[in-house]
Image (cartoon, rainbow, N blue to C red):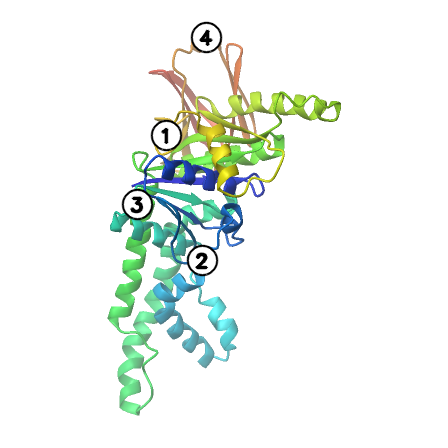
Amino acid sequence: MRVIVHTGKGGVGKTSVSAATALRCAEMGLKTIVISTDTAHSLGDSLEKSIGPEPIQIHPNLWAQEVDARYSMDKYWGRIQKYLTSLLSKQGVEEIVAEEVTILPGLEEGAHLLWINQYMEQGFYDVLIVDAAPTAETLRLLSLPDVSRWWFEKIMALTRGAAKILKPIGKVLGRNTENIPDDSAWNEVNVLFDTLDKVRQLLSDPEQSSVRLVVNPEKMVIKETQRTYTYLNLYGYATDAIVCNRIIPDEVNDPYFAMWKANQRENINFIGEAFGQLPILKSPMFGQEVSGLDRLRLLGNELYKDVNPAQKLFDGKTHTIVPLGDNSYRLSVPLPFADKNDMDIYRSRDELTLRVGPYRRNIVLPYALWDLEITDAKFEQSTLNLQFKR
């Protein structure tokens, strides 16, 4: 099964792009499911179909689902949460507050990952399209296994030890101990984390998964998308295309749009500078809202032309960031056919600009590199390697 994740700044058209991509895959004969992981679900509106928390078939070879995070949380976290809530309530914390406090950080977003694992194991679908939340939420989701495991292991060390003491004492005193979880409950949570790790491995395997960044040709949107791309590289997730949505068509000659079209042309060139060799899929701004299968089909035709959306569109990474230990990092940028004598580097605190001949490449640096210096720069085997260190 191929997994394609669409993410980007809020309002750029991720849902329409996801729905159009899924429809095109389905009409090419691939069993396709499109799921929404955005809490503000609009996938059903885009498809003009009534969908819910379970998959529903809406077209030949096409299923859709708006994930219910609360249901998944209750399923995977309910027993442990009841115990922690009970424990805090006995300490004088109001039950409704205790319930909120005991939600595992990121678990609401993590519920979506559990569905991805389920579909992978079932093997029924050929393609899974993910209409992801805006970029900040998506990045939290992708880093979830590391963050949540740290939090949970601290809590589990305390509460599991307490349970071993409280359960036998409660039985001797004749008190209700049903809210105190036994080892099987803790084992369920370990299975949860193992599942999250499996999904992370799946999403970071470029042979199985791709992230596609949806942008509009607007400078602020592009800048945020650059940051997202950099962090995806840092976490090891493969981006294989940029989707540039809502481009004003050339045939629009109204003087009112002249300046807007000029700005868009400039920003589309900037996208090429910002994302290197990544392919750019382009779609025009339509004269009406893109919803319903007929209009989504038009959008899919504009984006993909003769290309199969389910195939991998780019092999490799335009740059990688690797921690070296001792608070240092190596940034590697493949520059095939470049001449190091015709290369310049400009650096501000949060951005790096490479010039190779007449071409420029802008790389937004992650926060971890802002206060580090470039201590070494080497160009070897067609790759520029920069070391950042305090």
Q: Secondary structure at mark 3?
A: loop
Q: Position of residue 156 (x, y in %)?
A: 34, 65
Q: Which residue is mark 1?
A: 308
How far apart, in angstroms, are the residues tagged by discs 3 and 2? Answer: 18 Å
Q: Residues within 10 Å of mark 3 (few under 14, many from 20)?
A: some
Say what secondary structure mark 1 lies in: loop
Say if mark 4 contacts mark 3, CB within 8 Å: no
* Residue highlighted by disc 4: 341
Residue 206 screen position, x and y as percent:
32, 34
Q: Earlier in the sequence, mark 3 or mark 1?
A: 3
- Residue 125, which numbered label? 3
Q: Nearer the viewer, residue 89 or 96?
A: 96
Which residue is rendered at x = 31% and y = 43% of the image?
Answer: 202
The alpha-carbon separation of the residues under discs 3 and 1 comes to 16 Å
Whether label 3 touches label 1, CB < 8 Å: no
Q: Nearer the viewer, residue 233 or 13?
A: 13
Residue type, label 3: Tyr
Cα separation between marks 2 and 4: 58 Å
Amino acid type at mark 4: Asn
In this view of the protein, can residue 327 be seen by the observer?
A: no
Q: Nearer the viewer, residue 288 or 1?
A: 288
